[in-house]
Image: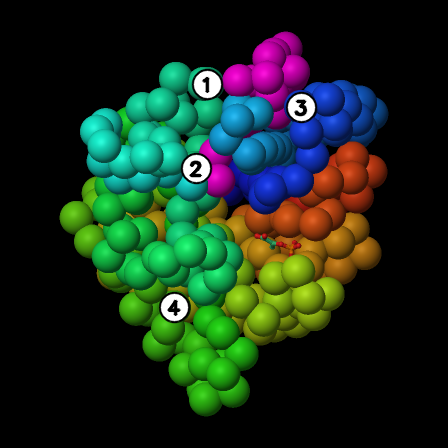
């Protein structure tokens, strides 16, 4: 049985004080649910807040992750942050290839850059959360599963996955992120089942241990239906991760999967 993972992607939001307050609120909510061993909970603040949020997380079961990294270990890469720097903060996860980095920000990351980042994360013993997902034109053209096959295959070139701690995948249809329009549970399961099959081909039996998260406008009221799908192992949550009660409500929906 895969332990569900609910990960909050804070994106470029909050500040040091409000981030710490959010952690306190999540902690209080999790204490009242008693979930700590049955659902893994992760927060991914902006990089400048990794250290203070690591402090705020001390003594809690909540884990820390980063939102991106640069694949080189060090050097003249102004503004970038290496995997080892992230690991030094106490973070254990890093989001890689988020759709905003693939499609919106700066020079737009391609699958080759994303693969290098996955490899760098693994070399620093971080667990990469590799994001994949189709755009609306790709879905309308019937290309969803082809896009997912391409992105998962390209993202994992040269990456060995032996246990579930080596990789998390997030299926995030681009048209569902921050739009309030989420995939139906059936659409999510079709994509997740497809990704699980491709993972079997790519990494072998460890595919059954890899968590595949759904992301895209997940809220407490729609979380349980999607989480109940057999190949959905939790969520990558954007907007709803910025409010303690909404985020804890989604953790509660993930808990329903394992009780
Ligand atoms: C995300 O940023 O990964 C995400 C899924 O955002 P939202 O939940 O706001 O759609």
How far apart are the alpha carbons under marks 3 and 4?
36 Å
Of discs 4 and 1, which sits in the foreground?
1
Of discs 3 and 2, which sits in the foreground?
3
Instruction: Identify residue for label 1.
Output: 90
Quarter of the image for residue 93 reads top left
Query: Which circle marks residue 152 in the picture?
Result: none
Where is residue 69? Give x, y as percent. Answer: 37, 38
Q: Quadrant of ligand 1?
A: bottom right
Instruction: Identify residue for label 3.
Output: 16
Cβ of disc 3 within 8 Å of ligand 1?
no
Q: Which residues are magenta?
A: 51-67
Of discs 3 and 1, which sits in the foreground?
3
* Residue at the spot 50% in from the left edge and 30% down from the top edge: 47
Instruction: Determine whether 88 is above or below 79 in the image.
Output: above
In what element is the residue under mark 2?
Answer: strand
Instruction: Identify residue for label 2.
Output: 94
Query: Which circle marks residue 148 in the picture?
Result: 4
Q: Earlier in the sequence, mark 3 or mark 2?
A: 3
How far apart are the alpha carbons under marks 3 and 2?
19 Å
Q: Indicate left or right for 27 with 57 as reference.
A: right
How far apart are the alpha carbons under marks 1 and 2?
11 Å
Residue placed furthest toward the left = 158
Q: Residues within 10 Å of mark 2 (few under 14, many from 20)?
A: many
Residue placed furthest toward the bottom = 141
| Label 3 with label 4: CB-CB less than 8 Å | no
Asked whether residue 30 is in view, the answer is no
How far apart are the alpha carbons under marks 2 and 4?
20 Å
Q: Residues within 10 Å of mark 1 (few under 14, many from 20)?
A: some
Q: Indicate left or right for 148 with 154 as reference.
A: right
């Amino acid at each position: 049985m895969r332990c569900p993972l609910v990960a909050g992607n804070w994106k470029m939001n909050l500040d040091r004080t409000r981030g710490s307050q959010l952690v306190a609120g999540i902690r209080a909510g999790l204490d009242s649910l008693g979930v700590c061993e049955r659902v893994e909970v992760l927060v991914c603040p902006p990089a400048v807040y990794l250290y203070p949020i690591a402090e705020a997380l001390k003594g809690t079961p909540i884990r820390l992750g980063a939102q991106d990294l640069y694949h080189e270990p060090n050097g003249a890469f102004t503004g970038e942050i290496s995997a080892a720097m992230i690991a030094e903060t106490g973070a254990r996860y890093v989001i890689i290839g988020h759709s905003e980095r693939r499609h919106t920000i700066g020079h737009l990351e391609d699958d080759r850059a994303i693969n290098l980042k996955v490899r760098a994360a693994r070399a620093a013993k971080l667990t990469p959360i590799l994001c994949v997902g189709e755009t609306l034109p790709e879905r309308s053209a019937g290309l969803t599963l082809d896009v997912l096959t391409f992105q998962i295959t390209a993202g994992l070139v040269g990456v060995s996955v032996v246990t579930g701690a080596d990789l998390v995948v997030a299926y995030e249809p681009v048209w569902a992120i921050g739009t309030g329009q989420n995939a139906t549970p059936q659409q999510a399961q079709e994509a997740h089942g497809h990704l699980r099959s491709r993972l079997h081909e790519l990494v072998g039996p460890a595919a059954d241990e890899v968590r595949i998260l759904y992301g895209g406008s997940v809220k407490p009221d729609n979380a349980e239906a999607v989480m109940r799908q057999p190949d959905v192992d939790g969520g990558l949550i954007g907007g709803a991760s910025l409010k303690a009660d909404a985020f804890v409500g989604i953790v509660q929906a993930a808990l329903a999967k394992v009780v």
